Image (spheres, rainbow, N blue to C red):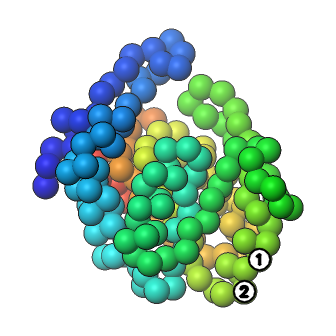
């Protein structure tokens, strides 16, 4: 496998002082590296769950990139968690903390109801696991509908930020640990 870290640039003090932002744009710009990243994340999915009984959940914004590619490769449905005000139908929302602030996520209520009826399992896919706040909020929304969720897959996990501990209800798999 290609060394994916070769295509991830660390940008100090972005979006605010003290944050080390991991820019995946160079990885996305190189088709071979992007394909390798998707293959590695897909492998983590395939060895962990029954794919035919799985819904991939992607989180705005960079998580959409990886979640949609993996959902297409696995032939799985894709559930989107969006920032407030981006979804046109009836939604449910949850606020959550980030490394550098707060935000609100929404999901279509009828999408969760449909998944609940199908009894499929949700697998969260995102680019980075930092503090775990975003996926924790998504998990809270899914649990409100008694939807099974036991796994989260990340391109990279940032060590030292306690994200894994915050998501102790989930099995965490990441391609890279930084």
Q: Percent position (x, y) of residue 28?
A: 33, 43
Asked whether, in this view, residue 68 is left or right of residue 79, the answer is left
Asked whether, in this view, residue 114 is left or right of residue 64, the answer is right
Q: Percent position (x, y) of residue 19?
A: 47, 21
| Screen quadrant of the N terminus | bottom left
Q: Which residue is mark 1?
A: 113
Asked whether, in this view, residue 106 is left or right of residue 134, the answer is right
Q: Percent position (x, y) of residue 8?
A: 29, 34
Label 1: state its secondary structure.
helix
Q: Percent position (x, y) of residue 159?
A: 36, 38
Q: Quadrant of residue 143?
A: bottom right
Q: Residue at x 48, y 18 (%)?
A: 14
Q: Residue at x 41, y 23 (%)?
A: 20
Which label is found at residue 49? none
Residue contact between numbered discs 1 and 2, judged by CB atoms under 8 Å: yes
Q: Residue at x 51, y 12 (%)?
A: 17
Question: Taking 115 as reference, is 133 above or below it?
Answer: above
Q: CA distance from mark 1 to mark 2?
A: 6 Å
| Screen quadrant of the C terminus | top left
Residue closer to the observer: 40 or 136: 40
Which label is found at residue 117? 2
């Amino acid at each position: 496998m290609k060394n994916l870290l070769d295509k991830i640039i660390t940008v100090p003090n972005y979006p605010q002082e003290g944050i080390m932002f991991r820019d995946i744009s160079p990885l996305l710009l190189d088709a071979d590296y992007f394909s390798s990243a998707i293959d590695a994340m897909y492998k983590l999915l395939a060895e962990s769950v029954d794919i035919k009984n799985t819904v991939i959940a992607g989180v705005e914004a960079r998580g959409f990139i990886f979640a949609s590619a993996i959902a297409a490769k696995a032939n799985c449905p894709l559930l989107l968690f969006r920032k407030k005000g981006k979804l046109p139908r009836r939604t449910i929302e949850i606020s959550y903390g980030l490394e550098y602030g707060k935000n609100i996520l929404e999901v279509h209520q009828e999408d969760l109801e449909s998944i609940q009826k199908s009894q499929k399992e949700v697998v969260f896919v995102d680019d980075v696991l930092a503090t775990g706040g975003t996926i924790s909020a998504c998990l809270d929304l899914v649990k409100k509908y008694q939807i099974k969720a036991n796994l989260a897959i990340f391109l990279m996990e940032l060590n030292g930020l306690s994200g894994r501990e915050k998501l102790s209800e989930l099995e965490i798999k990441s391609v890279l640990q930084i």
